[in-house]
Amino acid sequence: MRVSIVIPNWNGVYLMEKHLRNVQRDCPGAEIIVSDDMSTDGSVGYLKKNFPKIIVIERRKHEGFAANVNAGVAHATGDIVILLNTDVEPERNFLGPLVSHFVDPDVFAVGCLEKSEEAGKTIVRGRGIARWEKGYYIHSRGEVDRVNTAWVSGGSGAFRRSMWNQLGGMDTLYNPFYWEDIDLSYRARKAGWKTLFESKSVVRHYHEEGKIKREFTPADVKRIAYRNQFIFIWKNVTDMNILLAHAFWTPFRLLQALLQGDGLMLEGYLSALPAYPVILRHRNIQRKFSKLSDSHLMVLQ
């Protein structure tokens, strides 16, 4: 199987200086594409001068993570597309175990084991667990001793390009960031495809170096995450019992957040509301791919 590496970049030249040569070293023979989201830090010039064999996509409009990733994947020619953020570098021999799962034609995506550098500690991530509870999709980090996963990270994961194209890639409703990879994996699982986790494919994620930490305040990040949580639910849920639970519990959750001093949840909710007509259009488009109910995907531990 042919492999394409897609690296979304936005003002990450300092990260590519640190990690890009290791990506080349550990992905021999792979097509490497950097999709640049209209950087202003000289990223494109740096790439053209120092990495002439890498394909550089120069976008003319800064939109956010999902749109930038989609632009990169649109130029990929490999059967398998591996997404790597600029603050991620693979360890040696990570490629083989990751790609081996795609001999199963029902596999959509496979996630890597992330050694995430956070506050001076190494946190092992990469496998996700999730459940529906009171109309909300509760997701968290799972133990890394199992093969199943609720989603594959858009920052370090492999995806079958043909299935990616069928689903339409990441949904740009989630721009600038967060929930787009959970959404994509959820749609794939509702289509009956598999999302897996491979503990032998190891990457290092320098979380504190990333652009989100540098460019957005914690309040911005939390507000966007809340907004995208609502978008995810309104866009994906088709089971009436979950929708009714969401409608019933949302006023209580918003009130509880306010009483606890978390006005950002209400702000996220209010910022999602204007997008509701567009969310419904996206919902109608993707429903034709759904084969499984939300209740069928109720729990993944």
Image: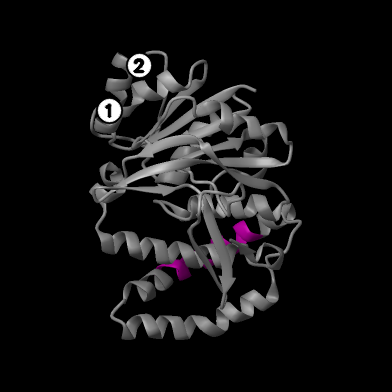
- Rendered-image quadrant of the N terminus: top right
**180 or 17: which is nearer to us?**
17
255 is higher (above) or lower (below) than 218 = below
Residue identifier under label 2: 51
Residue type at mark 1 is Lys
Give the main secondary structure of the magenta stretch: helix
Classify 10 Å Cα crowding around label 2: few (below 14), some (14-19), many (20 and above). Answer: some
Query: Residue sitting at 54 percent across and 46 percent down?
Result: 152
Disc 2 or 1, which lies upstream in sequence? 1
- Specify whether residue 84 is in view: no
Amino acid at pointer 2: Phe
Inspect the magenta stretch and tell me whether residue 282 lies in it.
yes
Residue found at x 62% / y 50%: 148
Q: In this picture, is 43 found above or below 133?
A: above
User: Residue tagged by mark 1?
Assistant: 18
Q: Residue furthest right?
A: 291
